[in-house]
Image: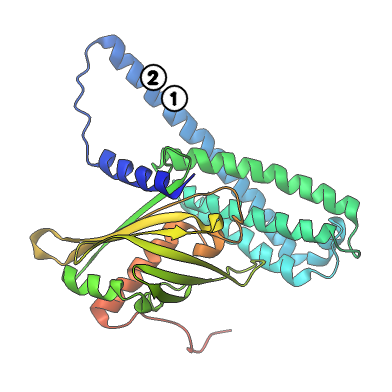
Amino acid sequence: MTIEQMNTDVESSSASRGQTDERPHRSTMSGLRERDGSQTRRTMRVGDNRLARGLAGFGIGLGLVELVAPRGLGRAIGMHDNRTLLRVFGLREIASGLGILSQPRPAGWMWARVGGDMMDLGVLVLALASNRSRRGKVMAATAAVAGVTILDVLCSRQLAEQAGMMTETGGILVHKSMTIDRAPAALYDVWRDFDNLPRWMSHLESVRVTGENRSHWVVKGAVGAIVDTVEWDAEIVEDRPNECIAWRSLGSRDVEHSGSVRFELAPAGRGTEVHVQLAYRPTGGMLGGAVAKLFGRSPGQQIQEDLRRFKQTMEAGEAPTTQGQPKGA
């Protein structure tokens, strides 16, 4: 999927949300067909949620084993001296599993599971090249993880389609919004200065302007990631002062995405509605090392948290943090 296709999908999805279906029911038969279709969609939704919860339970169980008995699990899959890495993977499995179980529509968390699967496969592939691993066991473990990955991808796509998160070309579409008690011009000015973005985007290491409408982004690696950081160049494709900023990534297919942030006056003069929309390609390339590292967790949740910190920064002057505070036992 190209950037141009994703931009088209973003626009068509935005337009479709603003349209109302006014087609009349022409006959009783058409009404029956609609009810049958609705029942089919409900059945699919229940089935997909059951599969998601089953995969979540499997992940939590595996995560507990990785935490409690990493040495035994390492021997079973032919990998030795990887206790710390297995424990980190265990924490990730438990976190994504709990995220899936806590949400009625856990599409974002399911994609986070897919990212974790890709990390696991990457580690297993590296283990196959090591002289210290038991290759027969590692190959069996790789086949098992590949099978789970296929189930995760299928379930994620179904849930994303149901949630309206899937674009026509198979990309993932995320839209989040928040009302902030500041004028659109003030919010636009702060956002447009890219040096400010790491203040509320916790996954961002830095953003450096490299030319007219172009910048270079560096994102921190997610917990358990194989690579510490991911970098890419971005280009602003639309810039309407006090209203909208739209962008797309350049060059690298590993982090191919596009998006926009819009600033709209809230009703009754109650501040500004900030809308962030992102479209990205969920398959191919370094999914575990790019999409997962791009957000560190569920993309929708990460964007929502970033917006919440942006709101706190603009309304209170800074976003609350626990860094540097004493911790309990």
Identify whether 135 is placed above or below 51: below
Q: Is residue 244 left or right of residue 78?
A: left
Q: How many marks?
A: 2
Is label 1 in a helix, a strand or a loop? helix
Determine which residue is flagged by label 1.
40
Determine which residue is flagged by label 2.
36
Dot 2, how many residues are within 10 Å of its Cα: few (below 14), some (14-19), or many (20+)? few
User: What residue is drawn where x is 22% and y is 17%?
Assistant: 25
Mark 2 residue type:
Asp
Q: Is residue 212 left or right of residue 161?
A: left
The image shows residue 58 at horizontal and vertical percentages of 66, 49
* Residue 300 vs residue 188, the one in the foreground: 188
Mark 1 residue type:
Thr
Instruction: Please say whether residue 324 is visible from this viewpoint.
Output: yes
Quarter occupied by residue 319: bottom left
User: What residue is drawn where x is 23% and y is 72%?
Assistant: 187
Quarter occupied by residue 310: bottom left
Q: Is residue 227 left or right of residue 209?
A: right
Identify whether 226 is placed above or below 155: below
Q: Please, which residue is most extreme toward the left here?
A: 268
User: What residue is drawn where x is 46% and y is 43%?
Assistant: 160
